Amino acid sequence: MLEDHKRTGAYYNACMQNRAAFSGKVVLDVGTGSGILAIFAAKAGAKKVYAVEATDMAKSAKRLVAAQGLEGTIEVIQGVIETVEIPEKVDIIISEWMGYFLLRESMLDSVLVARDKFLKPGGALYPSHARMFLAPIRSNQCRQRHHDFQNSMEGWAEFCEDMKQYYGVTLECLSEDYRKEQMDYFSYTAAWTDVHPSQVVGSAACFKSYDLATVTLEELKAPLKATFNMTVLEDGPVDAFCGWFDTQFKGSPQNPVTTEVTLTTAPDPTGATHWGQQSFFLHPPVECAEGDVLACEIEVVRRKDNQRLMDVMVKHRIEGKAAPGKERVSCFHIE
C-alpha cells in the first residue's frame, strides 16, 4: 500500500498542508502498520504521536521511526486498540481503515472505539468523512466471467471422466455442489476492477455518507439500507454496477483544516488505487436507453460467518418512457 501514491499522497497532503492543525497536538494512529502515517503527523508538527499496531509489524514500525530520528515524538505500542491504554487524551486520530467498498474488513469499528476512548471533545479524525457511490457500467468482464464459468464446468466434466476411466471412481454425485460453488464465485461474487471512466454509462449516486465524529458503532454494525436513482446516459446494456468510495479530510469544527483533501477511489483514467472498484455483474445485462432511470434499493450487511466480509443486495428496475420494467434482485458477496 505504500506504493499506492494516491493513497499515501492524500494522507501526506492532509498532514503537511495543514501543519497548523497538527502543531503541538497529541495524535493517535490506529493500526499504524509501517508507521508511515505517524511519521507524517510528527513531521507536520505533532508534539506526541501514539502509534498502535496489533501485529508484529509494530517492530518494523519502531525501526522505521528510529531511522527517521522521531523516536522522541512517536511511541509505537503493540496491542489491540480495544485493550491498550495511553496516558492522555488525544487531539487527532489518524487511521487508514478503509477496505474494499469502504466497509470490508470492519476496521472502522476499532477507530470508533478509539474515538470514544481517547479523543478529546472537539478533536478531529483524519479522515473525517466518508461516502459510498454506485454507478452503472458497461464491462466486457461480465461476458468473460460467464465464459470462465463455462470453461470451469467443462474442465470438471473432463476431470470426472478421467477419474472414472483411470481409477474407477465416479464423481458425478459432486457435480451439482461444484456447479453451485462455481456459479457463486463467477456470478455472485463482486470483483476487484480497474474501471475506466469511459465504461461508466450513467450518473453516479452517493447512497451513503458518514461523519466519523458522530456515527456510532451500533449504526455501523446495522444493515446499511438506501434508495437512490441513477440516470442512464447512453443506449445499450448495463452489465454491472460499479461501487467505490471517497474519504475527506476536513478536521473538526473546533480544529478545522486550512486545506481540505479528498482521497477518491472513483474510476480514473490514470489507474486505480489499491482498493480499485468493486464491480457487481448483472446476469443477464439490463438493456437501457438514454434517459432511462435505474431505480435502486441497496442493502449492505456483514456476513454472519465472517463479520469482516459483506453481502450486498441490489433491487433495481428501469423507469423509462415505456412502462416501468420488472424489478430484479441481484445478490453478491464481497470476499
Image: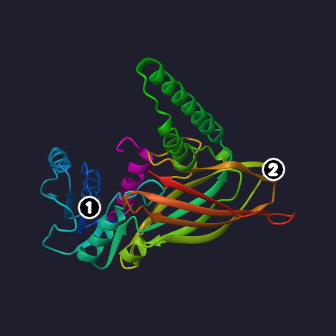
Most distant residue in the right direction: 322
Most distant residue in the top direction: 166
Instruction: Report if residue 47 lies within the magenta region.
Output: no
- Residue 154's spot in the image, x, y percent? 57, 29
The quarter in which the N terminus is drawn is top left
Residue type at the position of mark 1: Asp
Image quarter of residue 249: bottom left
Q: Which residue is mark 1?
A: 29
From the viewer's perspective, tell me whether residue 213 is left or right of residue 80.
Answer: right
39 vs 111, nearest the viewer: 111
Decide which of tag 2 and tag 1 comes sooner along the chain: 1
Most distant residue in the bottom direction: 121
Compared with residue 213, is residue 136 higher up or lower down, i.e. above or below?
above
- Residue 45's spot in the image, x, y percent? 26, 61
Q: How many other residues sit within 10 Å of disc 2, few (<14), some (14-19) or many (≥20)?
A: few
Q: How many other residues sit within 10 Å of disc 1, few (<14), some (14-19) or many (≥20)?
A: many
Q: What's the distance in space between the residues labelled 2 and 1, CA to CA?
A: 48 Å
Instruction: Report if residue 13 lies within the magenta region.
Output: yes
Label 1 secondary element: strand
Q: Taking the image as drawn, is residue 193 in sight? A: no
From the viewer's perspective, tell me whether residue 240 is left or right of residue 288.
Answer: left
Region rendered in magenta: 1-19
Q: Are marks 2 and 1 in contact (CB under 8 Å)?
A: no
The residue at the point 56 percent across, 33 percent down is: 153
Residue type at the position of mark 2: Asp
Q: Which residue is mark 2?
A: 235
- What is the number of the mark on residue 300? none
285 vs 51, nearest the viewer: 285
